[in-house]
Image: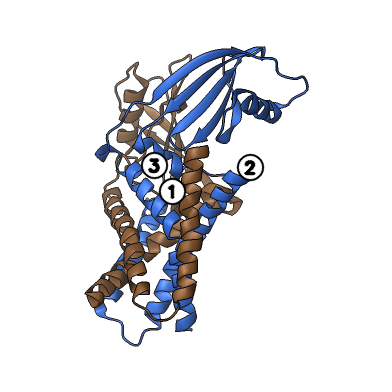
Amino acid sequence: MDSVLRKIHLASGLGLLVFMLMYFTSGFVIYNNSLFPNKPAERDTRSVELNIPDGLDDSGTAHWLASELDLSGKLDPPRPLDDGRTRIAWSVPGRTNIVYLAADKQSAEIVIGRTGLKGHAVDYHFVHGYGDGWLWNLWVLMLDLSSAGIIVFAISGIGIWASARERDKGSWAMLAGGTVLTVGMVLYYMIL
Amino acid sequence: MRKFLSKIHIWLGMLCAPYMIIFGFSSLHFNHHFSFVETGQHSVNWERQIAVADTSDNKVLAERVRLDLGLMGWVPWWEYRRGEDNSFRFIVPRPGKSYTIKVNPERTLASVEELRYGPLKVINSLHAFGHLPGSNMVKYWSWYTNICVFFVIFAGVSGVYFWSKRKDETLIGWLLLAGVSGGSLLLMIFVWIRG
């Protein structure tokens, strides 16, 4: 049993190492936002006339625009704005391509935003949701594997520790401390 | 040296294991929006006399009412609603509960709909939870979060070190490290360049 747990612990740790490190370091940057300087995003804006084919739905329009205007990235669902325009955005770590499609769909304003290193960290961290091409599906699959992997990593680690011949008082105290704090926080916010 | 690193790996691993389990679950939920996370949700209605000074500033008014009611939570500006009779409605969300508060025009009575969430939703709320107006407990979670972040980085590095010192499982280790982890790094670089 110990041998199996060690293999699982090794596999989940070594295999998902890079993605886990990426999520935790980018998460640290986001969580401790004030420690990292905010570099204002650079923005390039231009307007274009369009000739969108008839009969396209929102998704079809978005793909047509991406192809026609050479815009890449993970697609955010098109969003109608109060002024009648439609906002369509594609995100890549460090860059956002936004198209504000006019209500009559005859023209659009394109805004390309570029962020610094902090923006890169934020962007890497927030990619989620399947269904936008093989590249993004692969990334989101790695996110799922890393998320499940960290659970497996933790449980297998506890299992290895539990099956050890000797367990020192310090490790017991650490496990108790982490568990009490976590369960305590859940109960605190549920009850109070 | 190896014994010392192993002790730290185990001790911090035990400390951070509960956090990593809920962190992994909440990450999966962010990606998949599991409906079962919403189970256990129910509402309770209550009223309380309050005494707050009126103001035309919605944020200030919301904070005054929140403090008078003794509630922890944020007061998001996009939920402020002023009635034509000067009644005021706003929402105070927080982990575990969400309060919809209606204040009468005289600012003497608050009617509250308290939406209580189940444990899975609370667990999900703890992902990167670091600040909550009116809460003293959140700072302990903040420290714990930062400790666990450093531990994961340390565990990754120390784990590779421990594996490198082993005589067995070298082939499978190399396949995982170079193949899967190395492939992950190439994926990140490819995404960054290609978009």
Front: mark 1 or 3: 3
**Secondary structure at numbered mark 2:** loop
Nearer to the camera, B24 or A107: A107
Q: Which residue is mark 2?
A: A133
In the rendered image, the quadrant that contains the N terminus of chain B is bottom left
Q: Which residue is mark 1?
A: B125
Q: Could you tell me which chain the residue with mark 3 belongs to?
A: A
Q: Position of residue A176 (x, y in %)?
A: 32, 70
Q: Position of residue B191 (x, y in %)?
A: 51, 42
Nearer to the camera, A189 or B84: A189
Q: Colour of chain B?
A: brown
Locate residue A76: give its quadrant: top right
Amino acid type, label 2: Gly
Q: Is residue B16 visible?
A: no
Amino acid type, label 3: Ala
Q: Residue at x 58, y 50 (%)?
A: A138
The type of colouring in the image is by chain
Q: Which residue is mark 3?
A: A121
Locate residue B19: give its quadrant: bottom left
Q: Could you tell me which chain the residue with mark 1 belongs to?
A: B
Q: Colour of chain A?
A: blue
Specify which label sits upstream in the sequence, 3 or 2.
3
Q: Quick check: B26 above or below B105?
A: below
Q: Are marks 1 and 3 in contact (CB under 8 Å)?
A: no
Nearer to the camera, B24 or A47: A47
Q: Position of residue B28 (x, y in %)?
A: 52, 53
Q: Could you tell me which chain the residue with mark 2 belongs to?
A: A
**Secondary structure at numbered mark 1:** helix
> How would you rate the neighbour count of disc 1 (Cα within 10 Å): few for under 14, some for 14-19, many for 20 or more?
some
